[in-house]
Amino acid sequence: MPADDTQTFDSTVYYDDDADPSHIADKTVAVLGYGSQGHAHAQNLSESGVNVVVGLRESSSSRTAAESDGLRVETPADAAAEADVVSVLVPDTVQPDVYENAVEPNLEAGDTLQFAHGFNIHYNQIQPPEDVDVTMVAPKSPGHLVRRNYENDEGTPGLLAVYQDATGDAHDEGLAYAAAIGCTRAGVVETSFREETETDLFGEQAVLCGGVTSLVKQGYETLVDAGYSPEMAYFECLNELKLIVDLMYEDGLGGMWDSVSDTAEYGGLTQGDVVVDEHARENMEEVLEKVQNGQFAREWIAENQAGRPSYTQLRTAEKNHEIEAVGEELRGLFAWQDESEEDDEETAEVTA
Ligand code: NAD
Ligand code: MG
């Protein structure tokens, strides 16, 4: 099921000096969607001097936001029709529909289809004609940071991939797009649609979103089942995770080990692999295989077509886990709550 795609593992990193802005400067970019990524790409491109038109449905509540940010808004079809580059930044699950109805009929030879994630191209949910360029510029960060960093003259690291180069200009244009949204200020890594899609799915399932929440819940349950208080279990297994991850983010695993006590380091080094053992590794390999052979993609597409029955159930079960009620109560009692609520509001605003 995955599309045939040349895999590149050379880790070329591009910076501002490598990008030639003229490859995007005189083009019109249609940014479809004004959510997390859309609002950031549209405003950054526009302030970099690129002609931007935002594509949103007549009924979209994001229209007012885009217009008050000084951007021109058209329907997705009209925006795609006038654009040289169509940046598809609506949710991945609605992209095939938006592509079929609004984009495909308006693509001309030499246009560019631009993505921020490879799922629909890699798993053949969108099959572009051969005479257009297909590129990906994927900031490795939520959109509100892509925007905030740009405003602060800072960059956001990103990925660049070319799936199809019909014009011979796909790579240079993609790099110029990455520069215009601020990514080459920080560094842009060359990858492929296949590599980006498969590592992204594996990472969020096995480690980041799936793996870490299972680890937290099972740690919490182990302590509570053994008779310890839910409050202590919450602090130990969830709250302190942020402090540990911050250290790893700043200075790698070594930075974290250096900052914790020798007792924590010795216990962690001896017991970590007891918990996440070779079975976990075998399970990870299975998860990766389902990503690679398209089984996960097929399952997720079918789940959406069926109206998300299991997804809805799983979401409810997660919401009802005891750790959520305990956490809500505890977070209400402590001062850090205000700060994180501000962050949440900001995220909610830009994704609404
Ligand atoms: P989002 O959910 O934040 O925003 C979606 C936007 O699309 C909204 O403006 C919404 O109004 C609009 N929309 C929804 N349904 C629509 C429809 N049927 N027709 C037209 N418009 C519609 O999306 P996002 O998180 O910015 O994701 C966009 C792309 O960026 C995805 O491919 C995603 O994988 C990728 N990406 C996201 C992040 C992130 O942190 N959010 C990071 C990197 C890449
Ligand atoms: Mg066009």
Image (spheres, rainbow, N blue to C red):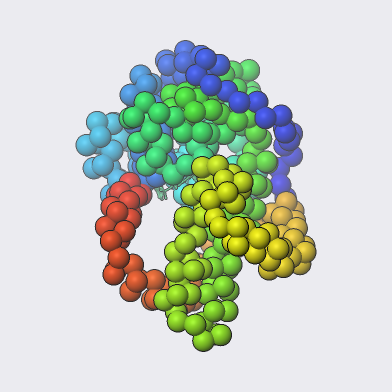
**Where's residue 319, x and y in %?**
44, 73
Q: Say left or right for 328 vs 338.
A: right
Quadrant housing residue 212: bottom right
Quadrant housing residue 145: top left
Q: Is residue 217 above or below residue 158?
A: below
Q: How many marks?
A: 0
Q: Say left or right for 127 vs 323.
A: right
**Where's residue 83, x and y in %?**
43, 26
Q: Farthest front residue?
A: 262
Task: Tell me the residue at 44%/69% (across/down).
Answer: 235
Quadrant housing residue 275: bottom right
Residue 23 appears in the rendering:
no
Residue 222 appears in the rendering:
yes
Task: Tell me the residue at 51%/48% (across/down).
Answer: 247
Task: Tell me the residue at 63%/29% (across/down).
Answer: 190
Residue closer to the observer: 181 or 216: 216
Task: Tell me the residue at 47%/24% (across/down).
Answer: 185
**Where's residue 330, x and y in %?**
34, 71
**Where's residue 325, x and y in %?**
38, 76
Residue closer to the observer: 105 or 177: 177
